[in-house]
Amino acid sequence: MKTSILKNRIYSIISRILIILIWIFLSRFIDNEIIFPKIESTIISLVDIVKGPNFFNIIWYSLLRSIVGFIISLFLAILLGIISSISKTIYHLMMPITNFLTSVPTVAIIILALIWLNNEIVPIFVGFIMIFPILYETVLKGIQNVDEKIIVMADTYRVDRFTIIGDVYIPNVLFNLHNIISSALGINLKMVIAGEVLSQPKYAIGSSLQLQKMYLNTSGVFAWIIIILIIGKVLEYILEGVKYLWSRLKK
């Protein structure tokens, strides 16, 4: 097990070194800062961005939009997933809705949101629309995949309905959500930033990316990409920490 983890870390380090080497090669080969910036200029832009007066406001508001959209999506996914598992009518009504949401292009959703909503709300709406179907399907499958033999046995021994829900259904749903929560949160953050690029709220990572693009500051765009990757990793570590604490508390 330890050998496998060590190998994975070595491969991860090698892949990062390769990315840096490719970056150095391409930047020198192209030799045009507007098309492909050098590492040095990207680091300078990164430092300038972090030192900027509104940097923490930009990060905070983008994260807040992402978290709010995610919580709304998760709440509705759990609620409608439970209702759909009980009511066949709701289940069949939700099928075309989720199919539509998973099929419609992201750009089309952003454009419609720009027509319908305030600029501050657009990124939240876009993030919600993109991850709600994923979370809903996960919750629904978690309920539907419960072994019927367990339920029959519980009914035979006249186990209380609330006990069945608490000890069988909820753990199954949480297990399914546990497997996709990190990727869903990552997708949500990306979609929120995509919504910000077009809706241009005052404090937003997407707005800052668009501003760098307008000034043809490609090194600034690269710097913001690095910041987004760091934020994604930090969120991933936080979630892993929460999962670890949860598993310890359960024991």
Image (spheres, grey):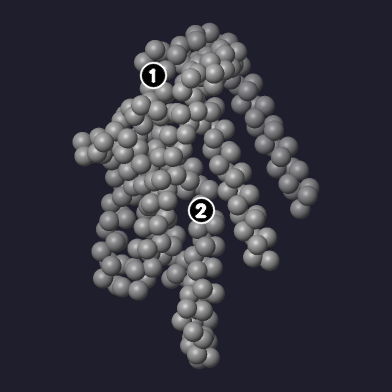
Classify mark 1: helix, strand or loop: helix
Q: Which residue is mark 1?
A: 211
Q: Tag 1 or tag 2, which sits nearer the N-term?
A: 2
- Which residue is farthest right? 3
The picture places residue 26, in percent across and down from the top left corner, at 56, 16
Q: Is residue 90 left or right of residue 203?
A: left
| Marks 2 and 1, how far apart at CA | 33 Å
Tell which of 59 and 228 is nearer to you: 59
- Which residue is farthest top? 31
Tell which of 222 and 167 is nearer to you: 167
Report crowding for label 1: few under 14, some 14 to 19, many 20 or more residues within 10 A (C-alpha): some
Asked whether the beta carbons under mark 2 and mark 1 sit within 8 Å of each other, the answer is no
For residue 109, which quarter of the picture?
top left
Q: Which residue is mark 2?
A: 180
Classify mark 2: helix, strand or loop: helix
The amino acid pointed to by label 2 is Ile
